[in-house]
Image (cartoon, rainbow, N blue to C red):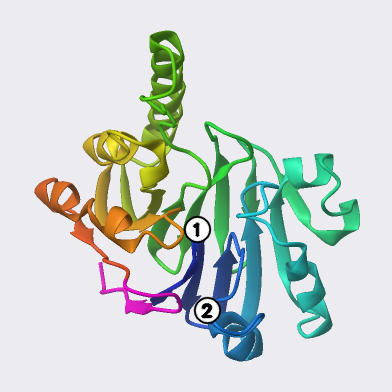
Amino acid sequence: MKLDYIYHSGFAIEADGVTVIIDYYKDSSEEVFNKGIVHDYLLEKPGVLYVLCSHFHPDHFNREVLSWKKLRPDIRYIFSKDILKHRRASAEDATYINKGDTYEDEHIRIQAFGSTDVGISFLIDLQGRRLFHAGDLNNWHWSEESTPQEIRKAEGDFLAEVRELQQTAPAVDVVMFPVDSRIGKDYMRGAEQFVERIKITIFVPMHFSEDYQGGNAFRQFAESKGCRFLSIAHRGESFELPNL
C-alpha cells in the first residue's frame, strides 16, 4: 500500500486494485494547472477509484472532481452531506454521509466521524489497514486572537470528538491530521492531544499549504509518543506503507 501526498490536505491511498483520493484541492504540479500525480497517473490507474471529500470548503472540495467521471465512469464519490446542503454538488453526484454514518461495499469501509469546523472526518478500513483523515477536525484555538472562553470551547469541542473516535478506534495505523502554523502560538496542540489519546503507528501532517517546515516540526513530538512520522518534502511525494 502507498500513500501519495497531493497538496494541502489532499492524499491518495493506493491499495491492491483500489485507489482512494481524499480532499482534492489542487494537483501536485506547481507549474502546470491540472497536471501532476492525479491527472497523469491516478485517474488512469486500473482498479476501483473512490473520491472522498470531507466538507465544502474550497481547500478540501474542488468541483473539478465531478468531471473525472467522464474519464472514469465507474468512479465512486463519497461526500460529506454539507457539500449537498451548500449546493456544491447535486443529489445524484455522490453518496452523501453525515457524522455517524457508514459507507461500506465489497472493497472498503468508511465511517464518518465529527469535525470541529464543518463536515466530517473519515475512518477508513481497507485491506487490513485502518486509516484516519481528519478533514478539518482540530483544536482550532487561535490562542493569540481568541478569548479565554473561546479557547476553552474550541478545546472542549475537539476533545469530545476525539473521545468519540477513541471509542471506535483506540488504535489507528495511519493518521493524516492538520499541523497548521497559521493558528499561531501552540499550533501543534491539537495534534499533540490527538496522539496522546489514540495509539498511532504512522502520523502524516497536513493542512499546511506550502509551510513544509511548520508541518514537519511535529516530528519530534510524534516520535516521542511512539509514532513513525512521515516528513513531507514536496507535492506528489509517495510513501510505501510498511506491513503493520
CA distance for labels 2 and 1:
15 Å
Of badges 2 and 1, nearer the viewer stands: 2
Residue 179: x and y in percent read 36, 48
Give the residue drawn at x 56%, y 70%.
20
Q: State the quadrant of the C terminus.
A: bottom left
Q: State the quadrant of the N terminus.
A: bottom left
Report whether 129 appears left or right of 219: right
Element assignment for label 2: loop
Give the residue drawn at x 46%, y 15%.
150
Relative vertical location of residue 67 with respect to residue 166 in this rendering, above or below: below
Name the residue tied to disc 2. 30
Relative vertical location of residue 188 with respect to residue 208 in this rendering, above or below: above
Range covered by the magenta-colored residues: 233-244
Depth order, front residue of 185/91: 185
Q: Is residue 239 magenta?
A: yes
Relative vertical location of residue 150 with respect to residue 34 in this rendering, above or below: above
Amino acid carrying label 2: it is Glu
Contact, mark 2 vs mark 1 (Cβ under 8 Å): no
Number of numbered tags placed on the structure image: 2
Give the residue drawn at x 26%, y 66%.
231
